[in-house]
Image (spheres, rainbow, N blue to C red):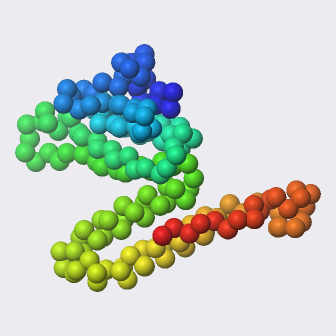
């Protein structure tokens, strides 16, 4: 049901019928039950309102995800292919959306992708062994972002040891830092 907004958008009445891609060579939407992995290589015709569907799907997947994951989305301007003017400019777009069971899991995937992208780019000029400092700085940025998120979420909670919650309000465990 988490993917219902997608297959409904495609005009299908079930996931089974909606999981088929517009292109035969793409596997479509496939859930591997044994590995608990959702694979999506799926093309559907759509408009700008499809972005709202993606937001809803991501919220649904957050509730089901065991780990953080990235979803890469490409939008192609089908009208551009049909235009005859050479001066016309396509409105293609690309985005990456992230899902996960917690903000920390999502941030971990974002961090890992950024580290991989930066290392791939910088290895053209430097040895991988020289890039440890760069990775350390990226980790600092994500740790700051995570700490700010945790602080913002704790603003509404009563301070520990106060209030009638028996000391359970703060949890007692410090959030794990991203590395």
Name the foreground residue: 167 vs 156: 167
Q: Could you tell me if residue 160 is visible in this image?
A: yes
Q: Residue furthest top?
A: 13
Q: Residue furthest front?
A: 34
Instruction: Find residue 44 and report its horizontal and vertical position in percent.
Output: 30, 30
Q: Could you tell me if residue 45 is visible in this image?
A: no
**Residue under the point 40% across and 50% down:** 70
Residue 138, quarter of picture: bottom left
**Residue under the point 49% across and 50% down:** 67
Q: Is residue 87 left or right of residue 120?
A: left
Is residue 22 placed above or below 70 in the rendered structure?
A: above
Instruction: Find residue 24 and report its horizontal and vertical position in percent.
Output: 20, 26
**Residue under the point 39% across and 33% down:** 32
Residue 123, quarter of picture: bottom left
Residue 104, quarter of picture: bottom right
Instruction: Find residue 120 and report its horizontal and vertical position in percent.
Output: 25, 68
Is residue 129 placed above or below 143 in the rendered structure?
A: below
Instruction: Find residue 143 and report its horizontal and vertical position in percent.
Output: 53, 72
**Residue under the point 56% across and 69% down:** 177
Count all numbered tags in the image, as a single digit: 0
Q: Is residue 94 left or right of residue 164?
A: left
Is residue 167 placed above or below 31 in the rendered structure?
A: below
């Amino acid at each position: 049901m988490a993917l219902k907004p997608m297959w409904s958008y495609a005009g299908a009445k079930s996931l089974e019928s909606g999981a088929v891609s517009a292109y035969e060579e793409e596997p479509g939407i496939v859930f591997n039950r044994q590995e608990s992995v959702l694979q999506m290589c799926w093309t559907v015709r759509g408009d700008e309102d499809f972005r709202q569907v993606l937001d809803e799907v991501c919220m649904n997947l957050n509730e089901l995800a065991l780990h953080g994951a990235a979803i890469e989305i490409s939008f192609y301007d089908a009208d551009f292919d049909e235009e005859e003017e050479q001066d016309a400019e396509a409105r293609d777009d690309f985005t990456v959306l992230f899902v996960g069971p917690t903000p920390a899991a999502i941030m971990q995937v974002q961090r890992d992708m950024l580290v991989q992208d930066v290392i791939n780019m910088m290895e053209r000029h430097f040895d991988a062994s020289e890039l440890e400092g760069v990775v350390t700085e990226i980790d600092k940025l994500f740790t700051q972002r995570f700490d700010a998120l945790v602080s913002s979420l704790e603003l509404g909670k009563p301070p520990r040891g106060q209030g009638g919650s028996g000391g359970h309000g703060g949890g007692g465990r410090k959030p794990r830092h991203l590395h």
